[in-house]
Image (spheres, rainbow, N blue to C red):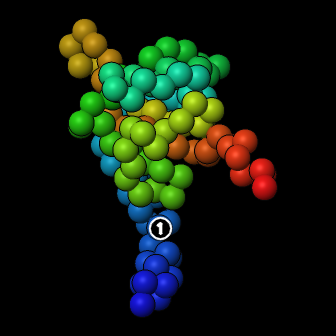
Amino acid sequence: MKGRVLAAGWPFAGLLALDAVRAGVSDAAPVRGLIVENDNQAGILVLESDDVSGPLTTDAATGLYGVDGYPITRGDIHVGDMVEAVQEKNGEEWVTTKVRVLWLASSPNLGAC
């Protein structure tokens, strides 16, 4: 039964990805970069890209999405992951409203037998 339910829901993963892209639509341009540091306890991800480098502060209101568009937790984002982040100016601070993982870092344990 679980296999059939999963197979039936898989075509809708693309729609979830589209919804994740549109969630929190703003005028801010997304920034793409590589996660070089991750502090899950404080909710800080350090992003390195050509455009900008620095910390992305996340909180409970920040939308976090995986490669497939499904919501994820902060613990699911790892150093080496390529992400796209949207930030908006809120008073004097920049607030990260959405982080979407574009592709995952390769794990050294995947090839080990």
Task: Work out whether residue 107 or residue 90 is closer to the camera in this orientation and state it.
Answer: 107
Vertical side of 40 occupied by 98: above or below: below
How many numbered circles does the render carry?
Answer: 1
**Image-quadrant location for residue 88:** top left
Q: Is residue 37 left or right of residue 59?
A: right
Report if residue 87 is visible in the image.
Answer: no
| Mark 1: secondary structure | helix
Q: Quadrant of the C terminus?
A: bottom right
**Image-quadrant location for residue 18:** bottom left
Q: Quadrant of the N terminus?
A: bottom left
Kindly identify the amino acid type of the residue bearing the numbered disc 1. Ala
Q: Where residue 54 sits: x, y (%)? A: 49, 14
Q: Where residue 68 sits: x, y (%)? A: 51, 58
Q: Which residue is mark 1?
A: 13
Residue at horizontal 39%, vertical 29%? 40
Residue at horizontal 53%, vertical 22%? 37
Vertical side of 61 occupied by 91: above or below: above
Residue lying furthest top in this view? 92
Report if residue 23 is visible in the image.
Answer: yes
Task: Work out whether residue 81 or residue 16 is closer to the camera in this orientation and state it.
Answer: 81
Q: Is residue 11 left or right of residue 70?
A: right
Q: Where residue 17 sits: x, y (%)? A: 46, 58
